[in-house]
Amino acid sequence: MSNRPQNRLLWTTIVALPILFASIAALQKTIDAHTLSTANEQDELLLRSPALVKRLSLGYDALLGDIYWTRAVQYYGARVGLPGAKFDLLWPLLDLSTTLDPKLLPAYRFGAIFLSEPGTVGAGRTDLAVELVKRGIAANPDEWRLSTDLGFLYYWRLKDYPDAAAAYLAGSKNPQAPPWLKLMAARVAQMGGSIETSRMIWSELYQSTKDPNIRKKAYQNLRGLKALDDETHLDTIAEDFRNRVGRYPASTKELRDAALLPGIPVDPDGFAYLIGPDGKSHLDPRSTVVIPSNPTDHPK
């Protein structure tokens, strides 16, 4: 009689494991498909049932969480940048990964980036990215970096500066958080979407991550913000020139010759800025610098 519970557990394991690993195989087959279509109805039902997968895991939650996170990375990497790319399975995969292993920090941090990126480089679902990071904070209250991720989403993606400031402030209350986090909260609350605040946030992201793709993205945005700052300054000087001379300058050389500039400013690629007939400065067509879209409350 005493062996019956053990036998029942053994038979449950024998039955459940094939189902579980068959579902993983079906998922991989979906990810490896040549088309970008979503899974069939049966796969969708499984993918959107994290509680079911957790019950079937039989204690291997963390292992399966890693497997599904790997699948999420594969799924995203196979589609990013492709024309017409869709990321319909990205959220279900991240939902599964973090349900199975709530301590899986990369799934929250990088998953939020994958979800929030617009166009063909992400799912364009900042709402789900916010939900994912909030889940991570609840499951990992000692991880102050998750609060910076939440602040970033509110600031950069949603332009919601009060909530961004609140997220940075909440993170700053963590005993392990660095002092600059409180400064970040104060700056966002006071200055909103200023270029300097944007630069500070991208600099923090560049310095705090080891992921080469995210570092590259941060570096590109820092270059773009530098160019935007330069152009804003040049536009002001060009307006001053018009007030003096009665017309806009034809080039930055003319501004230099008028003693309004100490030299000819160049962008991060080394190309001189150009000035249009309307007095607005812009990048040389040969430059690879990309100015971020609407990085502040006061776009150029």
Image (spheres, rainbow, N blue to C red):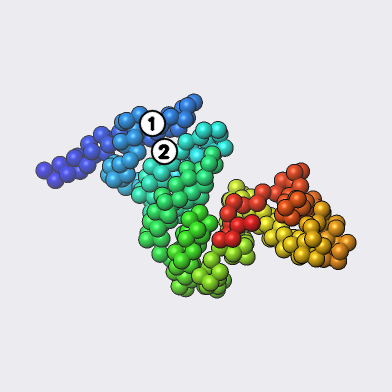
Observer-nearest of 251 and 139: 251
Q: Decide: is 200 above or below 78.
A: below
Q: Which mark is residue 103?
A: none
Observer-nearest of 278 and 60: 278
The answer to which quarter of the image holds residue 238 is bottom right
Q: Which mark is residue 39?
A: 1
What residue is rendered at 48% in x and 45% in y?
Answer: 124
Q: Decide: is 123 above or below 204.
A: above
Q: Decide: is 46 above or below 233.
A: above
Residue 281 appears in the figure: no
Residue 97 drawn at (x, y percent): 40, 46
What residue is rendered at 47% in x and 30% in y?
Answer: 36
In the picture of the structure, the residue carrying the numbered disc 2 is: 89
Indicate the amino acid at tag 2: Leu
Q: Residue furthest left?
A: 1
Earlier sequence position, callout 1 versus callout 2 = 1
What residue is rendered at 56% in x and 34% in y?
Answer: 82
**Number of other residues with Cα within 10 Å of mark 1, as a class: few under 14, some 14 to 19, many 20 or more:** some
Q: Secondary structure under badge 1?
A: loop
Residue 283 appears in the figure: yes
Quadrant into which the C terminus falls: bottom right
Residue 247 drawn at (x, y percent): 79, 58
Q: Is 60 left, or right, of 236 in this rendering? A: left
Query: How far is disc 1 from disc 2 in space, using C-alphas?
Result: 8 Å
Q: Are the residues flagged by discs 1 and 2 in contact, CB closer than 8 Å?
A: yes
Q: Is 295 left, or right, of 170 in this rendering? A: right
What residue is rendered at 56% in x and 61% in y?
Answer: 297
Quadrant into which the N terminus falls: top left
Q: Residue furthest front?
A: 246
Residue 284 drawn at (x, y percent): 76, 47
Residue 276 drawn at (x, y percent): 75, 50
**Number of other residues with Cα within 10 Å of mark 2, as a class: few under 14, some 14 to 19, many 20 or more:** many
